[in-house]
Structure formats: structure tokens, C-alpha cells
Image (cartoon, rainbow, N blue to C red):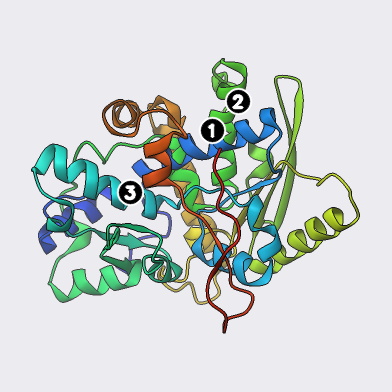
């Protein structure tokens, strides 16, 4: 949108532009991506070790969640109950940050998200993603909408001096950054799930699960965790999602054990780097690949690359959430799903899950 080379890391300039537009605090959705991994990895390990429903399917992409609810409502029990990073971040900003730092009530702050995705606009309207009649996220804007705002305000983004995210919801690990590219959520979850199961840290040379990287529509891998072969797959595009869901449905109908333990699905080909709210590529997929490469560069250069290493996340659990997967975590970070196969019927809650 501003003439910079695709994949250019311009995070600090975007923070500065948002401050110039008048936002009081600018935080990083990646903070909530780390939070998502803390809950999702915990949920997966519980299902794996305690006999829960497997495969676990990622729930970060609202377009995919809506697709599953409408096309495969019988399979929603396999969806992770974790909210997306957007929908985890907003209640933390509203009920934790506003109270602890600003001494404000939840309805005295406005939470605006900047997303690569148009489906996030739909997500913020889901009635279950709120508390006491207050919607968690007031407004979700796309990257293109933000670009228009910056241009209309006469802000010279390219020549802005970079600024840092505010604290304490602005720090994230490298695992969170790769959420934006297909296979990234899966890789981030494996980094923490490995530690949850083995109680050991992955060695530096084993932190990158390159088998799930790349822009193929379906990427499969087997990862051994404490002697357990964990079969994983990442699907990019709803066409590929449909193929996997049809296979899963057929296996269940035939009484077979599902092939995979974890399924990651992103609705947009390539993941959020190719999201519907991103600058148009005009069919040039190399731009999408460059954006993904930029995220892996950020990950590689972060001092911490596993979500469970984030000290601000640890503090959040200590001061507000309690234990992973506990009561407060479920209240603010988890959700449930509906059978939307018949658009003319009332919403039918079919898959409320707890650990």
C-alpha cells in the first residue's frame, strides 16, 4: 500500500502511525497468539493423554469456523474451544488491562483490532464473544482500511520513526509471529505441546518444524513426542479443508481411528498473509510468499521463540487467569460453537466443551 517491498518488516512504523492517528495504547495481537498457544497446547495435551476427542482442529480462523459450523456441524466437537487471538486479546484488554493499569471499567474503554481478515468483522459480532452485554471487540478494521486512514491523515509511513508496542500486552515470542502463515499455528503449538508432555525444552536446532512450512494446500507430518507419534496436517484454503473434513467424516462413519491428531486450517490460501483484508496482490503469489518469509525472519530473530517463555503471559496467568484451562481461562479465552447448517433455524448449541 505504501510502495515498500512485500515482506518488509514495518511493525514499528505501523505502531507509530496508529499513535499518530490518536490511539492511546497500541498492543500486539501476537501477545494473544502466545496466549492462544498456551490454551490450545494445553487442550491438545489433555485430549491426547486423557482420551478426549481427537483430532483437535485449530479455531483461529473465523471463516474456517463458520465453514465448519455450516458445512460440518457434526465435526464441531473436534474444534478447539480456544478463541482466536483477536477474541482472546479484547477481553484481556477490557477486563485486565483497563482495571489493572487504567483503573477503568470494562465499558469505559474501546478496543479496535487491525486484522488481515474480513471475516474478523463477522467474528466480533458473535454474541457469545462478550461479557455482561458488552461486546469484547468494538471494531475490527482491515489492513487496507488502516492504510486508507493513514493516507487520508497525511501520514508519511515510510519516513516515520519506529515506535515500540506498549506494555504489558505488547510483547510476543517468535511462535506468535508465524501464526500469520499456513502451518504456523501448528508449528507454534508443537513447540509448547512438546514441553507440556516431556517437561523438557526443545533444543534450538529442533524448534523449527519445517515439514509443515511451505505453501502447498495440504502439508502432513509426523512428530514424535515422548514416544508418541503425533500425526499433524495443515490445510490452506477451504477447498483443501473440505477434502480433509470429508475424509474425517468418512473415517468416523466407518468406525476407523482418525488419521490425524492435530488439524490446522486457514481459509485463505497461504494463511493470513493472503487474507481478504490485506493489500491486493493482483494474482502475484510471490508477494504472499514474501510476506510469509518476513514472518519467519521475525521469528528467527526473536530472543524467545516459544509461547510458554513469554514472561508477560506468565504474569497474566498469575494475576488474572489462574491455571491454564481453568475457570477464568474458559470464561475469557474459550468459546463454543453452533449448528448453522440450517440458516432458518434458531442457533443450536451442539458442542460446548470443557476440559
Q: Quadrant of the N terminus?
A: bottom left
Q: Nearer the viewer, residue 220 or 98?
A: 98
Q: What's the residue at 37%, 54% (across, down)?
A: 86
User: What residue is at 15 percent from the left and 42 percent from the top?
Assistant: 99
Can the viewer see residue 215?
no
Q: Position of residue 230 (x, y in %)?
A: 73, 34
Q: Is residue 176 left or right of residue 68?
A: left
Residue under pointer 1: 42
**Image point (71%, 50%), residue name:** 219
Secondary structure, mark 3, is: helix
Q: Quadrant of residue 31?
A: top left
Outermost residue to the top: 200
Lower sequence index among marks 1 and 2: 1
Mark on residue 194? 2
In this rendered view, identify the residue nearer to me: 270 or 294: 270
Residue under label 3 = 89
Whether 178 is drawn above or below 126: the answer is above
Q: Is residue 246 left or right of residue 142?
A: right
Q: Is residue 349 left or right of residue 111?
A: right
Amino acid at each position: 500500500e505504501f510502495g515498500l517491498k512485500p515482506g518488509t518488516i514495518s511493525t514499528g512504523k505501523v505502531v507509530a502511525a496508529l499513535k499518530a492517528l490518536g490511539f492511546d495504547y497500541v498492543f500486539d495481537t501476537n501477545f494473544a497468539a502466545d496466549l492462544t498457544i498456551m490454551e490450545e497446547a494445553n487442550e491438545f495435551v489433555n485430549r491426547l493423554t486423557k482420551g478426549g476427542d481427537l483430532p483437535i482442529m485449530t479455531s483461529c480462523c473465523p471463516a474456517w469456523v463458520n465453514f465448519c459450523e455450516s458445512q460440518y456441524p457434526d465435526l464441531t466437537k473436534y474444534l478447539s474451544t480456544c478463541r482466536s487471538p483477536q477474541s482472546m486479546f479484547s477481553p484481556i484488554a477490557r477486563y485486565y488491562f483497563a482495571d489493572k493499569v487504567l483503573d477503568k471499567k470494562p465499558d469505559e474503554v474501546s478496543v479496535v483490532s487491525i486484522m488481515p481478515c474480513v471475516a474478523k468483522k463477522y467474528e466480533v459480532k458473535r454474541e457469545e464473544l462478550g461479557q455482561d452485554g458488552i461486546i469484547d471487540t468494538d471494531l475490527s478494521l482491515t489492513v487496507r482500511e488502516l492504510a486508507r486512514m493513514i493516507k487520508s491523515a497525511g501520514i508519511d509511513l515510510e519516513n516515520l520513526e519506529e515506535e515500540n508496542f506498549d506494555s504489558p500486552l505488547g510483547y510476543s515470542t517468535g511462535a506468535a509471529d508465524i501464526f500469520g502463515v499456513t502451518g504456523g499455528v501448528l508449528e507454534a503449538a508443537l513447540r509448547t505441546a512438546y514441553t507440556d508432555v516431556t517437561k523438557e525444552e526443545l533444543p534450538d536446532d529442533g524448534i523449527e518444524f519445517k515439514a509443515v512450512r511451505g505453501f502447498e494446500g495440504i502439508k502432513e507430518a509426523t512428530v514424535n513426542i515422548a514416544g508418541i507419534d503425533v500425526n499433524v496436517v495443515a490445510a490452506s484454503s477451504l477447498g483443501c479443508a473440505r477434502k480433509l473434513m470429508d475424509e474425517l467424516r468418512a473415517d468416523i462413519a466407518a468406525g476407523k481411528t482418525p488419521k490425524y491428531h492435530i488439524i490446522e486450517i486457514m481459509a485463505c490460501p497461504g494463511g493470513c498473509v493472503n487474507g481478504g483484508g490485506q493489500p491486493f496482490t493482483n494474482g502475484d503469489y510471490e508477494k504472499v510468499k514474501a510476506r510469509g518469509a518476513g514472518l519467519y525472519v521475525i521469528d528467527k530473530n526473536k530472543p524467545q521463540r516459544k509461547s510458554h517463555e513469554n514472561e508477560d503471559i506468565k504474569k497474566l496467568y498469575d494475576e488474572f487467569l489462574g491455571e491454564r484451562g481453568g475457570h477464568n481461562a474458559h470464561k475469557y479465552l474459550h468459546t463454543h460453537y453452533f449448528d448453522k447448517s440450517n440458516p432458518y433455524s434458531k442457533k443450536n448449541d451442539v458442542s460446548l466443551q470443557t476440559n
